[in-house]
């Protein structure tokens, strides 16, 4: 996974090979974002700290019965808002190592601590932000000899990825830590979730575990549907209550 969201510290190194890297300022203007690092040594300096802000946080690709209600959740674990222009979320076919679908996130912004949920339909997935398919099965299940992967890119540079089911021969570039996030279930209601929420140690097997469904909210270990729908804000709730009272009074009969 490549790296955004924290200040980097460098120590001078002599006689080292240069890695490929791109640096730009974030919205606050004081944090370096490094979008691509081919090696730990870049331009004669050693990268001593790294962490990605936007991560693939929860994936539910398999459900009991027909695969309806699939979703992918992204999470901004950083301290500032991130404009997602140039970001794409790719679905990787394990038999080829290539994308079988790609979704542009242009025009979207993800606030610090916020979630972005891509789904097949808002009627089947709570807190869905972006409908990417109107039918079931848009996320492939793994095959008998290979799994599948989800990859997040910024301007073509790989930022984060996770492999589920088998790694096979084509998914090694997407298997952080050389491990798989595991398997979803077609008999239990569950997802593959970063636990604790947002944890990213660059090891799919260590970072992901079975969780109950929590699209758009913090991950919880276990199984079942733990979706949380945001409550109506207090002023709006008062307005709705008042409107109901007025409607009741308005339909009452006047004294004869």
Image: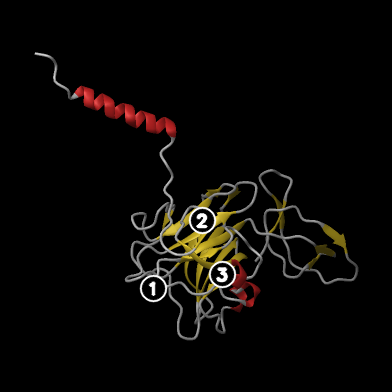
Q: Earlier in the sequence, mark 1 or mark 2?
A: 2
Q: Residues under labels 1 and 2: Cα distance? A: 29 Å
Dot in front, 2 or 3: 3
- CB within 8 Å, label 1 to label 2: no
**Looking at the image, which is closer to me, 108 or 62?**
62
Q: Earlier in the sequence, mark 1 or mark 3?
A: 3
Determine the secondary structure under disc 2. Answer: loop
Q: What mark, if any, has residue 162 been given in the picture?
A: 3
**Looking at the image, which is closer to me, 172 or 25?**
172
Where the N terminus falls, by quadrant? bottom right
Q: Residues within 10 Å of mark 2 (few under 14, many from 20)?
A: some
Taking the spot 73% from the left edge, 49% from the top edge, the residue there is 31
Q: Is residue 206 above or below residue 105?
A: below
Determine the secondary structure under disc 3. Answer: strand
Q: Residue furthest right?
A: 14
Q: Give the side of residue 158 with respect to residue 247, left or right.
A: right
Q: Position of residue 232 (x, y in %)?
A: 41, 38
Kindly indicate the quadrant of the structure image that contains residue 204: bottom right
**Looking at the image, which is closer to me, 53 or 18?**
53
Determine the secondary structure under disc 1. Answer: loop
Q: Is residue 148 above or below residue 107?
A: below
Q: Earlier in the sequence, mark 2 or mark 3?
A: 2
Dot in front, 1 or 2: 1
Query: Badge 1 is on which residue?
Result: 186
Q: Residue furthest front?
A: 222
Q: Give the side of residue 23 with respect to residue 43, left or right.
A: left
Q: Residues under labels 2 and 3: Cα distance? A: 18 Å
Q: What mark, if any, has residue 105 been given in the picture?
A: 2
């Amino acid at each position: 996974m490549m790296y955004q969201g924290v200040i980097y510290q460098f120590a001078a190194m002599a006689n080292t090979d240069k890695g490929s890297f791109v640096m730009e300022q974030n919205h606050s203007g004081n944090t370096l974002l490094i979008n691509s690092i081919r090696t730990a040594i870049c331009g004669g300096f050693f990268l001593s700290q790294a962490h990605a802000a936007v991560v693939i946080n929860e994936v539910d690709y398999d459900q009991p019965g027909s695969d309806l209600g699939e979703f992918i959740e992204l999470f901004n674990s950083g301290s500032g808002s991130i404009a997602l222009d140039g970001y794409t979320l790719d679905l990787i076919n394990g038999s080829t190592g290539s994308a079988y679908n790609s979704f542009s996130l242009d025009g979207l912004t993800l606030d610090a601590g916020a979630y972005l949920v891509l789904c097949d339909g808002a009627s089947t997935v709570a807190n869905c932000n972006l409908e990417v398919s109107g039918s079931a099965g848009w996320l492939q299940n793994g095959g008998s000899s290979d799994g599948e992967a989800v990859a997040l890119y910024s301007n073509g540079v790989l930022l984060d990825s996770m492999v589920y089911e088998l790694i096979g021969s084509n998914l090694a570039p997407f298997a952080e830590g050389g491990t798989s996030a595991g398997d979803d279930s077609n008999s239990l209601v569950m997802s593959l979730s970063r636990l604790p929420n947002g944890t990213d140690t660059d090891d799919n097997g260590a970072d992901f575990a079975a969780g109950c469904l929590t699209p758009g909210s913090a991950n919880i270990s276990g199984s079942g549907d733990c979706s949380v729908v945001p409550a109506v804000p207090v002023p709006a709730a008062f307005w709705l209550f008042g409107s109901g009272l007025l409607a009741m009074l308005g339909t009452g009969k006047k004294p004869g």
